[in-house]
Amino acid sequence: MTRARPGPLAISLGDPAGIGPELIAEAWARRESEGLPSFAALGGAEILQAAARTRGIDLPLKVVANLLAASEVFADALPVIGTDDGPWSPGAPSREGAELALGSLAAATRLTVEREAAALVTGPIAKARLAEVGFDHPGQTEYVAAACGIPPADAVMMLAGPRLRAVPLTVHVALAEVPALLTSDLIARRARIVAAALKRDFGVSRPRLAVAGLNPHAGEGGKFGDEEQRVIAPAVSMLRDEGIDIVGPFPPDAMFTARARARYDAALCMYHDQALIPLKALDFDEGVNVTLGLPIVRTSPDHGTAFDIAGKGLADPGAMIAAIRMAGDCAARRAGDRASG
C-alpha cells in the first residue's frame, strides 16, 4: 500500500561553502527517479543555482513565500523560501556564510516546530564557524532539541543506513570522559526513546535492541573493566523487565557482522566512534543522522561539509537523498498515526 505523503519538508542549506547546496540541487534533480517527497530550501537561491551548474544541472528555481506555494511549484522548480543569499565560494568558508547557514537552520527549524513543514532536513555545517557567529550548541541535534523544548538528554542521535542502525549513548565528548558519563539510568532512558521511535517512525512493531559493551571483550567478566557488570547489565535487566526486547552487553568487535546484525533492529553503543565507525564502513554514502525523541522529524546526511571537494562535482548525493526520503517516510507514518487516532 502506498503511504500518503504529508506536506513539504524544510531543508537548511548547511555551510554554503560546503557540499550541502549542490547536494540539495542534485536531490531535486533526481526527485522523480528517487521518488522523493516535496521539499523547500531555506534561502540561498543564487548559491543553489551556482552549485547546481558545477554538477551540470540546469536548475529551475522559484522563490516562494511559504510552504503551500512550495508544494505547488515543486514538480517544476526547486522552491526557495526567503531571500537571504550570498556569493558562492566552494571550499572557502567565511563568517558571512556561517551567518547564512545559521539563518537557514533557524528558519527551517521554526517552520517545522510550528508544524508548517512536515519534517526538517539539515545540511552539513561547520561547528567552529557557527560558533563565531553565536551558535552555542554542541551540534545541530542539540539546537533542534532546544527549539522543541526537549532536554538534550532526551534527544537521541541515531545513525541509520540500509545495513545498520546505531545509537551512540554518549556523543561529542572526550573518550576519557565516557566511563563517568555512563549510568544505568542514561542507558535505560535512551533505550526507551529508541524503542518508541522505532515503532512510531520506522514501523518496527517489536523493536529488538542490542547493547555493546564498553571494554574489550565486554570486560571479560571484569578482567578488562567492570562497567559491563556494574552499569550496563543492570540497565539491560531493568529494560527487559519492562517488556523491551533488549540483549547484551556484547563484545563490540563482534556486534556488526552480517550474522549479528540480523538479530537486532538497532545497536546501542557506548560512545561516538563505536557507533559511527561501523555505520560509515557499511553505509557511508547512504547514512542518515536522525534525531529520536523529538515532537518533530529531523534528519541529516551523515557526512560533513567536505570543503575539500565542494564545487568539484565529486560529492555523492546518496546520503542527502536518503535523509530526505527517510524524513518523508517518518513524517508520513506520524501523519498516518494521527489520522487513525
Image (cartoon, grey):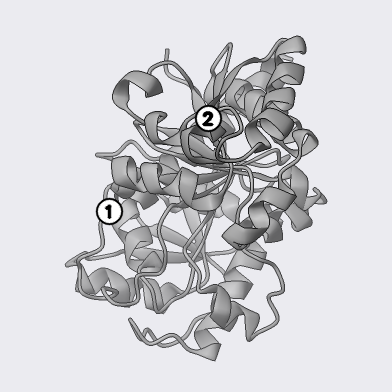
Q: Amino acid at mark 1?
A: Ala
Q: Is residue 97 above or below residue 147?
A: below
Residue drawn at x 54%, y 89% is 95
Identity of the residue furthest to the left in this view: 56
Q: Position of residue 192 (x, y in %)?
A: 71, 27
Which residue is outermost to the front? Answer: 223
Q: Quadrant of the C terminus?
A: top right
Residue at 47% from the left image edge and 31% from the top image edge:
251
Distance between the alpha carbons at the discs numbered 2 and 1 = 52 Å
Residue 82 occupies quadrant: bottom right
Q: Earlier in the sequence, mark 2 or mark 1?
A: 1
Callout in the foreground (2, 1): 2
Q: Residue tagged by mark 1?
A: 29
Which residue in the structure is indicated by mark 2?
Answer: 220
Check the picture and name the quadrant holding the N terminus. Answer: top left
Residue located at (69% from left, 58% from top): 142
Give the residue type that dot 2 points to. Answer: Glu
